[in-house]
Image: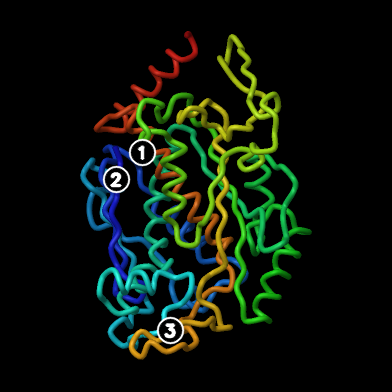
């Protein structure tokens, strides 16, 4: 099974990661990974940091002549904005940030906490997730995402996987509707004018996922739980929902569940996807559909009230350069996070030290499922 560990600070010299468990024989495309990193840096409302960094991945191990060896894969991103030793210590924690709790817990200054708690860490997670996307494509599994809400501007239209891929192209906020995009940009501009920040919601889809990833037998193996936890670990995410999500509370059972059908050629299937592709902690063959809600960025120019940790007197919170809205970037990071969890579930289910072995196990399972 897959696991990874990241290391590095926001303004440190490097961000690094080690991905363990990827089978040998996977062809690695650095250009694909770099394009995903570039997507993460785009979006109306991003801060000045994105103009400084040009994220390009370097592999430090586990890849030989363009293919994985089965050994741990090392990732390296260099920070152009490397100035951690020049930055001042801070004493006025920002409401909504890790500053206060982290400083008290670790008996450190705020600087040490915010450098690691910063969303800059998601750059290396995006690289790891892009690597997992390459693995999933070997099984014709695709993961995509789009923004469905920023502030009060909300996309009500339901769109297909292919429509997301086609219609989000060129959007400044990764939205499939140009009309809603204009309203989303207006929400961000309003926040800029008011020296404020704005949050929103994005949707992630995965198609081509087979029935049976994850398990009902242990709570830690339930795939929806794993995906939800992973998305919640992303900075600023405050809620996660699958399928119709929170609407389940007001929907009768007769309209909440996905009826089951059978086709001799394709096997079992559903005509609806209210569960978001996962039932009982296991994939049911439909697209995985998950949404994540991001809070407004907790660093804003309209400084909120705080307390100076040295004097204990009320003062305005410190300000560090920040985005006004990071939801478009969040949707790209969300894709990477979901891709990792699906790849992990694939290897949990099908194993294999080499990609060839994993594919053999996978193909045998598909035949089994269709004949049951």
Q: Which residue is mark 1?
A: 344
Q: Which residue is mark 2?
A: 3
At x 44% / y 32%, what residue is drawn? Answer: 139
Which of discs 2 and 3 lies nearer the camera? The answer is 3
Crowding at dot 3, Cα within 10 Å, few <14 / some 14-19 / many 20+, comes out as some
Kind of element beneath mark 1:
helix
Q: Position of residue 21 (x, y in %)?
A: 26, 41
322 displayed left or right of 124: right
Task: Establish if 125 lies above or below 99.
Answer: above
- Quadrant location of residue 196? bottom right
Q: Position of residue 334 (x, y in %)?
A: 50, 52
Quadrant of the drawing holding the N terminus: top left
Q: Position of residue 32 (x, y in %)?
A: 45, 52
Give how far apart the Cα atoms at labels 3 and 1 are. 43 Å
Asked if the residue under mark 1 is in contact with the one under mark 2, i.e. CB atoms within 8 Å, the reply is yes
Colour scheme: rainbow
Kind of element beneath mark 3:
strand
Residue 307 circle label = 3
Q: First in sequence: mark 3 or mark 1?
A: 3
Q: Position of residue 316 (x, y in %)?
A: 50, 87
Looking at the picture, tell me which residue is in the foreground, 172 or 104. Answer: 104
- Quadrant location of residue 254? top right
Q: First in sequence: mark 2 or mark 1?
A: 2
């Amino acid at each position: 099974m897959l696991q990874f560990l990241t290391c590095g600070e926001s303004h440190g010299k490097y961000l690094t990661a080690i991905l363990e468990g990827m089978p040998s024989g996977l062809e690695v495309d650095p250009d694909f990974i770099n394009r995903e990193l570039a997507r993460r840096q785009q979006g109306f409302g991003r801060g000045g940091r994105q103009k400084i960094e040009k994220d390009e991945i370097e592999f430090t191990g586990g890849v030989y002549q363009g293919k994985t060896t089965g050994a741990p894969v090392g990732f390296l991103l260099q920070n152009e904005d490397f100035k951690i030793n020049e930055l001042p210590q801070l004493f006025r924690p920002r409401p909504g940030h890790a500053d206060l709790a982290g400083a008290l817990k670790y008996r450190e200054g705020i600087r040490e906490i915010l450098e690691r708690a910063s969303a800059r860490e998601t750059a290396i997670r995006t690289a790891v997730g892009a690597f997992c996307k390459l693995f999933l494509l070997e099984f014709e599994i695709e993961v995509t995402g789009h923004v469905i809400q920023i502030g009060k501007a909300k996309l009500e239209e339901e769109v297909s996987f292919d429509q997301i891929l086609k219609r989000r192209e060129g959007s400044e906020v990764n939205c499939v509707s140009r009309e809603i995009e204009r309203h989303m940009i207006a929400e961000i501009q309003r926040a800029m004018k008011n020296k404020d920040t704005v949050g929103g919601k994005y949707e992630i889809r995965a198609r081509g996922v087979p029935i049976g990833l994850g398990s009902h037998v242990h709570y830690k193996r339930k795939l929806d739980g794993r995906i939800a936890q992973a998305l919640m670990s992303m900075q600023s995410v405050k809620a996660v929902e699958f399928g119709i999500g929170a609407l389940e509370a007001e929907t009768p059972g007769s309209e909440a569940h996905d009826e089951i059908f059978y086709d001799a050629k394709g096997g079992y299937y559903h005509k609806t996807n209210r569960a978001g592709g996962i039932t009982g902690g296991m994939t049911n063959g439909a697209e995985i559909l998950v949404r994540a809600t991001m809070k407004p960025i907790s660093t804003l120019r309209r400084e909120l009230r705080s307390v100076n940790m040295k004097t204990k007197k009320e003062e305005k919170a410190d300000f560090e350069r920040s985005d006004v809205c990071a939801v478009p970037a969040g949707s790209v990071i969300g894709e990477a996070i979901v891709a990792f969890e699906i790849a992990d579930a694939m290897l949990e289910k099908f194993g294999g030290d080499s990609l060839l072995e994993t594919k053999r196990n996978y193909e045998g399972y598909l035949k089994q499922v269709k004949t049951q």
